[in-house]
Amino acid sequence: MANDTLPHWLIHHASIQPKRVALRHKHLGIWHEQSWKSLRSEIGQLVDILDKLGFGRGDTLVLLTHPRREALLLSLAAQWLGGIAAPLDPSLEDDHVALLLRYLNPVFVFAEGQRQVDQTLANSRQDVNVIYAEDRGLSAYPQTALQHYAELLRITPAASRAPVAEAGQSAFALYRVNGERNVQVEHFHHDELLEEGRHLVFAERLSQHEEALAARVFAASGHLRYLLSPWLTAGFTLNFPENIATRDADRRELGPTLVAGTRETYQRLESLVRERLPVPNSLTGRLVTYALRADGDVFQRFLGYWLVKRPLRDVIGFSRIRVPLLIGPALPVDSLQFFKTLGIHIRTWDKVANWRTLSTTTSRQLPSVHDTDVEADNITKAS
């Protein structure tokens, strides 16, 4: 593709498979589907919304939210206009979130709900523009710069314009606070992300028929490389749980074929499975041991799959899993072997991080998003 950017790949799928489900999200216990064509239409509205707020080429949209579809769509809209998306993990310690916001001093923010709005207003510039998803508790806020995502869509007509994003531009910037309380950044260009996505699609034989679950915020490099990018290159369905608390139940309900998780994710799932195992020396325990023997005969393998492996895989929503990916630090050998016993062969996909420590100056402005090799005190705009 000549224009190797995330928005251009979205347009590509909206053209070749307009009616196929691109996203599925759960709200109030009900799953809602959105086609590639509908997705492009909504992002077109968001492009106009951001443009009217003054967002343009080189600007950064900070996203302070748990995994949700609105954050992904706003990220693509910001990139459509030649800007950059900077997701922050709201589960970070409060002082780390505050430090990052004070350093970035953002002009444009997407905040999930009241808590994230409060954090933004307390640690950002006075003229910050905030779009929020959940309106509970925010009706009495006097700030005119606060705008509800759903209301903005309601009053904004459908529109269409060509993306101005370029392959070599930064699409995402991830920020974190290290042990010395220094702010660090890692940039990801459009073409870099898409190339790694294509590599995963080829290596794991991913197709448009996959079902993936976005159970973690896109504030980790592995989830950008090995979940978001393959979604756009292969054109499969990306699912969002209702919230963090329901992710395991939602995974069991969906039975995704692709999961990208961290060491902590898989260790938590391992604990859920082990809780269901009987006492080893009991009659049931001996039956489970017999059925799961790796060198068992055909009968043992049959018994092990239908009476043990399949029910235990259902516990963690891995009934249809085909591509379980591990991102980040490795799992202990015992854990890998445990999942292998259940017929779950976890593959490690990750690259060495390229975090860059930013200058600890009094400036709270964003570093340039066009060139990741420049010094940290180069800024996109004056206060």
Image (cartoon, rainbow, N blue to C red):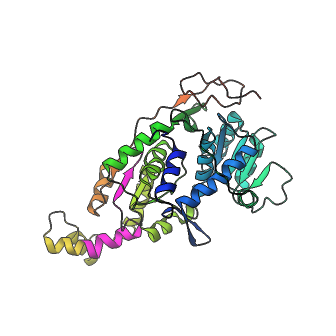
Dividing the picture into quadrants, the one containing residue 78 is: top right
Q: Give the residues drawn in magenta, as a range.
A: 305-330
* Image quarter (top left, top right, bottom left or bottom right) of the N terminus: top left
> Looking at the picture, how far across and down is residue 137, in whole percent?
78, 61
Residue 86 in view: no
Q: Residue at x 47, y 31 (%)?
A: 354
Is residue 323 a member of the stretch shown in magenta?
A: yes
Give the percent coordinates (x, y) of residue 58. 64, 33
Can the viewer see residue 11 in this picture? yes
Near-viewer residue (120 or 130) = 130
Question: Up-down: is 300 above or below 234?
Answer: below
Residue 219: % across, % down: 55, 45
The outermost residue toward the right is 142
Quadrant of image for the C terminus: top right
Extreme-left residue of the structure: 297
Query: Does the magenta segment cover residue 339?
Result: no
Residue 61: name its quadrant. top right
Note whether 285 is above or below 369 in the view shown: below
Is residue 162 or residue 69 the one in the foreground?
Answer: 162
Residue at the spot x=76%, y=44% of the render?
53
Q: Position of residue 282 (x, y in %)?
A: 27, 75
